[in-house]
Image: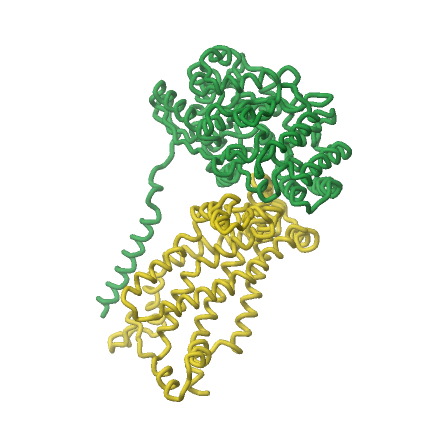
């Protein structure tokens, strides 16, 4: 039996007199009551809308007009005939493949730098975490325009060195990368989790290995990184899911342009839903996105046993 | 033990009650249909520049002063995102009581049952039937026109005079326009140009096709009507300007945001001429007082510019105070008081009497707008809202082609083919 007993389940002589079945049913009831606000929220605000959108995805549903059941037509059209869908996928994959590793690397390096016992370290941590709190906001998106616009700070800065900048945001070759940069800058939550992971690594491992003559590089490679893989795995999954759904910056800063170079999946979905009012079509797009994320998360989960290292395993092996 | 369990349940129940009541706070007022004279609050939404916001807010105040039982909850913004917001609200049956719409949306919105019939409440006696015709669908008035505007161009008169350039004159031609761009470049600095890259601009090209007598880009019955020869001629002229560096490079062109003081190429001094509605003159004038002037849209065999009803007010079918909303809309267009406050912020007032009455009190900026209006009225094109359902083609598909032309990713021929192909999705 677990050391931590559920305080709501009483194992006293009195309760034995009550029927066991009843007790089993009754005891968790209080627990369910406690979590009922979240259960309600889940059913009413998550599950119900999801099921509704699944239903819509099989209909030709134009907002404020009628709805017709069309079976798999939306899916067929999207997968076989929609050029813009293909283009938005390409843009999204580009964004995910570059932004996720870059963001995790930034988070890890900064977590390593902050994992030191220096006076005032918490002040540094707060300062560095701060951008992540505001990074997803409209205000920062506007700020990005001021920095990377044609007459932005970036170009003025480059101008000091006599370099002729460009309209970073309005040029299709660079627009997506400014958005990647914005995403990387929001490394805070991943960094905090890395920091917690670093603190979990037992000191003894470092002490023992240094006695055995391991240098810093070997320690990082053989101890820190393997011990961090569970945290890395978690951060990776979260970052991938987040990156696939990226919307705000692409919508506010570039509106998917110029030349659809930042037309990420969610922006395209939004265009179908709220510019063209094709809710059925947009719901199908949403479910395709969900399936894609599920498949990719599944692949990561399946491969994780080859590279994610849990401490409990080490005791056996 | 039983006691402890009871306490646990009680705690859970109390907790749940607190959470649920916290969730539901704010929903405690049950809306009822107010009686005549009972105080009502009307939600009203519009888009525009700062100058329009200011006068509209003053008009709302004046109305409340005269009708103390009516107060307003205004929502106003720029054009960016306005339609998205309104559509979302409408889909949730939560659109404002009164909202501003573009003439081209009226038919679409009426067919979606998002507008109510206002026939019985609006006095149209002094209003030109040409302006109201768009608001009528099946003999029911779904949209009320707020003003009439002329489409032309705005130019930086101060800068041109300083550079020793001759200023354009009313009734000029497209040939003169293109020649002017080339001539002006000699006197302009490295990052200064006469005008934007308008090759893929829906409105600029519309004016060009009108001027060459080829009509609207989409016919009233919803047929693709971009004339291939005219479009190629147009796009080739721009391509030459682009290659010679007479118009801004693509990334500068794409950074332009109308009315944004930090991103409007005209306001920043990067260009000297851009397309404009006369009603927007005040917005630009306020950013750079006294610098600008208006000129007619260039012409060819025919005029390029046109007059059109600028904006409409519609009333939501979910409004609980529709009667009060109608009264307000009637006041907004027909009372001289409103006309005096609003000036030409939404174009020349639709009520001819109001327009005549306020003419003497117009500001200089409004007067400049009137001049263009009168010049365009003489030879203007007949404007039509076109077929419904093409908004996305105008907004999104043209923007893409605009960028592709400007970044040199498509030749004029390819651009035409793309527009034709994309149009197939909308054609009926």
Which shade of the palette goes to chain B? green
B235 horizontally vs B343: left or right: right
Residue B422 in the image: state x and y as whole percent.
70, 42
Which residue appears at 53% of the width and 20% of the height? B369
Which shade of the palette goes to chain A? yellow
The quadrant of the image that shows the N terminus of chain A is bottom left
Residue B69 visible? The answer is yes
Residue B91 visible? The answer is no
Q: Quadrant of residue A54?
A: bottom right
> Which sits in the foreground, B158 or B386?
B158
Residue B386 in the image: state x and y as whole percent.
66, 29
Q: Is residue B177 above or below residue B92?
A: above
Which residue appears at 41% of the width and 69% of the height? A194
B45 horizontally vs B185: left or right: left
Residue B19 in the image: state x and y as whole percent.
32, 53
Taking the view exactly as shown, the residue that stands out farthest to the bottom is: A212
Taking the view exactly as shown, the residue that stands out farthest to the right is: B229
> Which sits in the foreground, B8 or A168?
A168
Which residue appears at 52% of the width and 53% of the height? A178
A67 horizontally vs A251: left or right: right
Q: Is residue B240 above or below residue A133?
A: above
């Amino acid at each position: 039996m677990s050391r931590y007993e559920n305080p709501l389940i009483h194992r006293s002589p009195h309760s034995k007199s009550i029927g066991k079945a009843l007790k089993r049913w009754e005891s968790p009831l209080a627990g369910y009551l406690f979590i009922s606000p979240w259960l309600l929220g889940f059913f009413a605000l998550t599950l119900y809308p999801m099921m509704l959108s699944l239903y819509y995805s099989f209909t030709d549903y134009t907002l404020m007009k009628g709805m017709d059941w069309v079976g798999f037509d939306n899916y067929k059209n999207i997968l076989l005939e929609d050029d813009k869908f293909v283009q938005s996928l390409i843009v999204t994959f580009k964004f995910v493949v570059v932004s996720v590793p870059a963001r995790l690397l930034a988070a890890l390096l900064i977590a390593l730098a902050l994992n030191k016992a220096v006076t005032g370290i918490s002040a540094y941590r707060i300062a560095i975490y701060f951008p992540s709190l505001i990074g997803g906001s409209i205000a920062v998106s506007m700020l990005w325009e001021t920095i990377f616009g044609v007459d932005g700070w970036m170009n003025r800065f480059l101008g000091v060195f006599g370099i002729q900048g460009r309209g970073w945001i309005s040029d299709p070759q660079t627009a997506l990368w400014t958005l990647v940069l914005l995403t990387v800058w929001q490394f805070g939550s991943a960094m905090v989790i890395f920091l917690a992971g670093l603190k979990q690594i037992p000191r003894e491992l470092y002490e023992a290995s240094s006695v055995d003559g391991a240098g810093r590089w070997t320690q990082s490679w053989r101890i820190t990184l393997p011990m961090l893989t569970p945290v890395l795995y978690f951060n990776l999954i979260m970052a991938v899911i987040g990156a696939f759904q990226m919307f705000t910056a692409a919508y506010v800063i570039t509106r998917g342009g110029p030349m659809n170079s930042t037309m990420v999946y969610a922006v395209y979905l939004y265009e179908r839903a709220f510019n063209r009012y094709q809710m059925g079509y947009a719901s199908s797009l949403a479910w395709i996105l969900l399936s894609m994320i599920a498949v990719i998360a599944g692949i990561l989960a399946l491969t994780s046993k080859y590279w994610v290292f849990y401490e409990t395993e080490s005791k056996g092996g | 033990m039983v006691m402890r369990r009871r306490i646990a349940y009680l705690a859970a129940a109390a907790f749940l009650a607190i959470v649920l009541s916290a969730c539901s706070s704010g929903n405690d007022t049950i809306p009822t249909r107010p009686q005549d004279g009972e105080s009502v609050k009307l939600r009203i939404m519009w888009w525009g520049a700062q100058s329009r916001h200011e006068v509209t807010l003053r008009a709302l105040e004046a109305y409340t002063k005269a009708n103390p039982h009516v107060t307003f909850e205004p929502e106003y913004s720029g054009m960016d995102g306005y339609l998205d917001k309104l559509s979302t609200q409408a889909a949730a049956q939560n659109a404002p009581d009164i909202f501003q719409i573009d003439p081209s949306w009226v038919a679409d919105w009426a067919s979606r049952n998002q507008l109510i019939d206002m026939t019985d409440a609006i006095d149209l006696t002094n209003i030109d039937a040409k302006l109201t015709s768009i608001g009528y669908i099946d003999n029911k008035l779904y949209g009320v026109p707020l003003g009439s505007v002329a489409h032309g161009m705005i130019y930086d008169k101060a800068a041109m005079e300083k550079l020793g350039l001759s200023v354009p004159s009313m009734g000029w031609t497209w040939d003169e326009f293109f020649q002017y761009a080339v001539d002006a470049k000699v006197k302009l600095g490295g990052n200064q140009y006469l005008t934007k890259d308008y090759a893929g601009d829906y409105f600029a090209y519309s004016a060009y096709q009108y001027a060459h007598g080829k009509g609207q880009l989409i016919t009233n019955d919803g047929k693709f009507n971009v004339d291939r020869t005219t479009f190629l001629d147009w796009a080739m002229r721009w391509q030459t300007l682009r290659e010679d560096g007479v118009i801004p490079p693509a990334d500068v062109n794409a950074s332009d945001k109308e009315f944004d003081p930090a991103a409007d190429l005209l306001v920043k001094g990067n260009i000297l001429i851009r397309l404009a509605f006369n009603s927007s003159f005040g917005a630009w004038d306020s950013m750079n007082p006294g610098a600008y002037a208006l000129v007619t849209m260039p012409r060819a065999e025919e005029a390029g510019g046109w007059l059109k009803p600028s904006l409409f007010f519609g009333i939501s079918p979910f409004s609980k105070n529709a009667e009060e909303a109608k009264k307000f809309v009637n006041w907004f267009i027909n009372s001289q008081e409103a006309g005096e406050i609003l000036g030409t912020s939404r174009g020349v007032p639709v009520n001819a009497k109001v327009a005549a009455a306020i003419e003497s009190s117009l500001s200089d900026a409004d007067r400049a707008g009137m001049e263009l209006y009168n010049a365009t009225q003489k030879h203007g094109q007949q404007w039509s809202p076109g077929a419904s359902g093409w908004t996305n083609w105008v907004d999104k598909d043209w923007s893409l082609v605009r960028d592709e032309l400007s970044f040199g990713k498509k030749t004029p021929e390819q651009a035409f083919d793309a527009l034709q192909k994309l149009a197939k999705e909308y054609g009926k």
